Amino acid sequence: MSRVARDPSRPVTSLELVCPAGTPAALRTAVDAGAHTVYCGFRDETNARNFPGLNFNREELRDGVAYAHDHGADVLVAINTFPAAGNLDPWYRAIDDAARLGADAVILADIGLVEYAKDNAPNIRRHLSVQAAASTPEGINYYANNFGIARVVLPRVLTLPEIKELNRHTEVETEVFVFGGLCVMAEGRCSLSSYVTGKSPNKTGVCSPASHVAYEETGAGLASKLGGFTINRFAQGEPAGYPTLCKGRFAANDKVSYLFEEPVSLNLLEMLPEVADAGVTALKIEGRQRGKAYVEKVVKAFRRAVDALEKGQQLDAAAIADLTEGGQETAGAYRKAWH
Amino acid sequence: MSIDGKDAKITLGPLLFNWPEAKRRDFYFRVADEADVDSVILGEVVCSKRTPFMTKLWEEVIERMRAAGKEPIMSTQALILSSREMGWMRDIVADPGIYYEANDIAVADMLKGRPHLIGPMMNVYNEGTLATLARGGADRVCLPFEMSGETTAVIAKAGIMEVEAFVYGRMPLAIAARCYHARAYNLPKDNCRYVCNLHNDGMTVDTLEGKPFLTVNGTQTMSYTVNNLAAEIPQYLEMGVSRFRISPHDVDIVRIADLFRGVLLGRVEPQQVLDETEGLVDGAPNSNGFFYDEEGLRYKVAE
């Protein structure tokens, strides 16, 4: 049972902060830094951050749940890839085990799995993953009416006014990404990575995987490549970024540009009052692949901001500046001008 | 249950590109009169801004297809972003006499209780999801582009509904709220001047070395390669796939349909189809990698 989400003593204006726990150590760090809720995944293809060195085995999840619950935090388990036909058992087991080990909710994307969870693990809350790309009240209500989902993580395709409007037409809690990596495409509906590498978020839980990345010195600078294709090129002294496919430099219409998106990350810290006004229940921080120091810094900054908001205080400008890391930031699809 | 090629059906998929109305009309009238296809999918899948101009044309084309003995199917948007767009979807699916393709769960839900087609933009990766959708009335599915042959076989053999495979055309790989066509022309989406109509098969995206990489079609990002599964058709028939989808391009689509029909009937060698179609669309090569669970852009010669 999600104690945070259902705690009647919390004011209606309070926002639940949902934080990444890529490893057991990151889980403890996030909880200590003030996360209301953490999310994690099992160490296999059942979750969309299936990276080497990340995630939890069953015992680690049991311990992580105990630690979080002792400190008043909830644990959500992401089981948000799409199982291939004929091999559903690992996903069914993941749902069964998340429930058995005391997690507070499972985050699911596949329609068949949501139905399985409703029928076979009815006591664990069901959240709809961003990977399901449910962008409309009608789509969300389909999952609510048929499978009793309690919450939806919204795809990053809607503006804040659109989210406010959406919240007027569904009883389902909404959770939005507020910080970290940013998909430009509708999540869960992108096969760009598998087109180039054979591995995709939907099938294997990876995007632009490191196994297919190469850096090559060329006459024109250092080229970052994915699956043999140049995704970007950097002049001497320019910091070389990771070749995430949709954040590369390409030529179209006789012009070289970051056609899909600049190598930016999302940061809505300054916009939290507007986010709260849009009627969302929870704020999600991306970054299960990030280290403990990063998790601690981001979670603390957002927790301070959420608490300040709850008390009607101004947000701390210094905390915001401290988060930016010198990288480019965006409010992404939440602002109309981005589209 | 394997399928006899004589019983297999060919579907012409929805036109994904923004062709001018006159070109569209000519295309569909020719398809009605000359193309050896069983079903023709109409409607706008990619961008709602293109839709308002076409309602009358669709009415006309539906009649024409029926008169020609072809099944008209109306498709719907892949990504629905506003209540206004949802209202249009509701209007589109209002005719009980028409068979529809859903590309979003919200539309599939509107079609509940009526037979309908689950389009390839919906995430159907397994028999569990398909069984759930079947209980809502779906009776045909065109599987996602990245689906392997092996997984397709499991789904087809489960016998839950008729299975269609996408065998010809550039593959839609992603959809976004952002319009990359407008972006490439330094235009805001709200004032896009419909620049997506400048490229009849989409706008080529090159790497910095000038190597063709992807294709942009408005808010949709597609493969540069042209998916061509002519050589895999015998395997598809064996596993029970009964429908084959050809996606419209600015090529002689009547000839393409004839070639694929020839393969289904055993009259044309798949190699002839591959040879004749290679490079037809913007010089782009054929690909079939997803069928073999490999990179989608690759062409793998069957052993």
Image: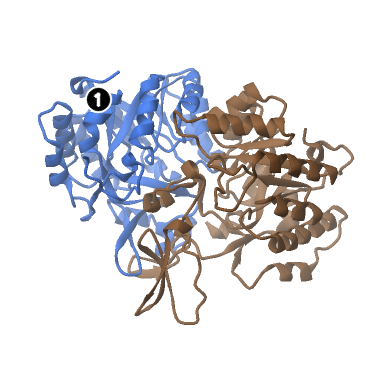
How is colour applied across the structure in the image? by chain
Point out the residue furthest to the left here.
B267
Horizontal placement of B112 versus A119: left or right? left
Residue at image position (10%, 29%) is B267
For the point 55% across and 53% down, which residue is it?
Answer: A52
Tag 1's secondary structure?
strand
Q: Position of residue B248 (x, y in %)?
A: 26, 41
Looking at the image, is A24 positioned above or below residue A77? below
- Quadrant of the rendered image containing residue A220: bottom left
Residue at label 1? B9
Chain A image colour:
brown
Which chain is tinted blue?
B
As drawn, the residue found furthest toward the bottom would be A236
Q: Is residue B125 left or right of residue A5?
A: left
The image quadrant of residue A42 is top right
Q: Which amino acid type is marked by label 1?
A: Lys
Residue for point 89% across, 40% down: A9
Other residues around mark 1 within 10 Å, as few (<14) / some (14–19) / many (≥20): some
Above-or-below relation of B200 to B58: below
What chain letter is assigned to the residue under label 1? B
Q: Position of residue A63 (x, y in %)?
A: 75, 42
Locate the N terminus of chain A and report the quarter of the image it occupies: top right
From the viewer's perspective, tell me whether residue B117 is left or right of residue A331: left
Residue drawn at (34%, 80%), measured in percent from left and top? A219
Residue B127 placement (x, y as % from top left): 45, 25
Q: Please tell me in which quadrant of the rendered image residue A174 appears.
A: top right
Q: Nearer the viewer, residue A30 or A284?
A: A30
